[in-house]
Image: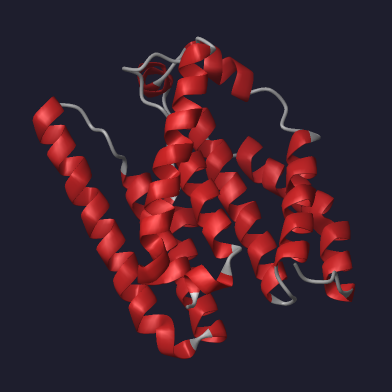
C-alpha cells in the first residue's frame, strides 16, 4: 500500500468532477432502437438503470480514485483511476443498452499499449500479442456458441474489451482477468436473476464483470508487468 501524495490528493478532489463528466457521457449516449432494446433484456432492469446516475457515479469515481491512490504510487495511480472511470462509463452504457461503443472501447486498446510502453517498453509486443490473442479467442468462443445454440452469446463489445484487457495487463495476467470476469459475471447474473430483473435466457450485460476483473488485476503491478 502506497502513501498518498500531493498529485493523488488532487486526483481524489477532482474525482467528483470526473464522475459528473462520466455521467454526462452516459446520459447523452444515444439509445438504440426501442425494438432492439426490448428484445435484448428485461424492461424492469432497464427502468431501474435509467434513473438518474447522480450522486452514485460521483461517489463511485471518488471511491476508485481513493483505492488507486492507496494501491499504487503516483503517477501510476492516476492512470489506474482514469482507467476505472472509462470502464465505469462502458459498464453503465452496457447495463442500460447492452451496447459497448467502439468510440470508447477501441481507443482503450491503444491506451493500454501506450501505458505499457511508458511503464515497461520491452513488454509492448507481449501486450499487443495478448490483445490480439484475447480478441481472437473470445470471438471464436462466441462464434462456436452461436453455431451450437443459434443465438449470439458474446457481443463484439465484449471482444473489444477483452482485447483491451490484453493490452493493459499482458499475456501472463490475462488468464486471471478471464477467470475473475467469469466469477464476477456468474455472481452478477445470479443476483439479477434472483431479484427477478432478468431471466437466465435473457441477454445479460457482461462488460461490468470484465471491467471489474481488468481493474482488479491492473491494481497489482506484479501481475501486469512481472
User: Is residue 197 something that shows in the picture?
Assistant: no
* Percent position of residue 38, x then y: 41, 16
- Horizontal side of 165 relative to 145 (left or right) equals right
Vertical placement of residue 155 versus 66, above or below: above
Q: Residue at x 10, y 31 (%)?
A: 148
Q: Residue at x 43, y 65 (%)?
A: 109
* Percent position of residue 213, x then y: 50, 50
Residue 26's image quarter?
top right
* Percent position of residue 39, x then y: 35, 17
Residue 66's image quarter?
bottom right
Vertical placement of residue 79 versus 114, above or below: above
Camera-side residue of 160 and 175: 175
- Horizontal side of 26 relative to 196 (left or right) equals right
Residue projecting furthest to the left: 147
User: Is residue 138 something that shows in the picture?
Assistant: yes
Residue 54's image quarter?
top right
* Percent position of residue 4, x then y: 85, 69
Q: Pick the quarter of the image with the N terminus.
A: bottom right
Q: Residue at x 71, y 61 (%)?
A: 68
Camera-side residue of 136 and 39: 136
- Horizontal side of 180 relative to 28 (left or right) equals left
Residue projecting furthest to the bottom: 122
Q: Residue at x 37, y 46 (%)?
A: 158
Vertical placement of residue 84 versus 205, above or below: below
Amino acid at each position: 500500500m502506497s502513501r498518498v501524495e500531493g498529485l493523488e490528493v488532487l486526483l481524489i478532489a477532482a474525482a467528483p468532477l470526473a464522475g459528473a463528466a462520466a455521467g454526462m457521457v452516459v446520459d447523452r449516449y444515444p439509445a438504440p432502437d426501442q425494438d432492439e432494446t426490448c428484445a435484448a433484456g428485461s424492461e424492469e432492469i432497464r427502468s431501474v438503470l435509467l434513473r438518474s446516475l447522480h450522486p452514485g457515479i460521483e461517489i463511485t469515481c471518488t471511491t476508485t480514485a481513493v483505492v488507486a491512490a492507496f494501491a499504487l504510487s503516483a503517477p501510476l495511480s492516476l492512470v489506474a483511476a482514469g482507467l476505472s472511470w472509462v470502464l465505469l462509463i462502458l459498464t453503465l452504457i452496457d447495463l442500460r443498452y447492452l451496447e459497448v461503443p467502439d468510440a470508447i472501447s477501441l481507443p482503450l486498446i491503444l491506451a493500454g499499449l501506450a501505458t505499457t510502453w511508458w511503464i515497461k517498453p520491452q513488454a509492448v509486443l507481449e501486450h499487443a500479442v495478448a490483445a490480439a490473442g484475447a480478441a481472437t479467442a473470445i470471438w471464436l468462443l462466441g462464434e462456436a456458441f452461436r453455431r451450437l445454440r443459434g443465438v449470439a452469446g458474446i457481443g463484439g463489445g465484449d471482444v473489444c474489451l477483452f482485447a483491451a484487457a490484453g493490452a493493459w495487463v499482458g499475456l501472463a495476467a490475462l488468464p486471471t482477468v478471464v477467470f475473475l470476469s467469469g466469477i464476477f459475471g456468474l455472481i452478477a447474473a445470479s443476483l439479477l436473476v434472483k431479484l427477478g430483473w432478468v431471466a437466465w435466457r435473457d441477454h445479460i450485460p457482461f462488460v461490468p464483470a470484465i471491467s471489474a476483473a481488468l481493474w482488479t488485476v491492473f491494481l497489482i503491478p506484479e501481475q501486469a508487468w512481472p
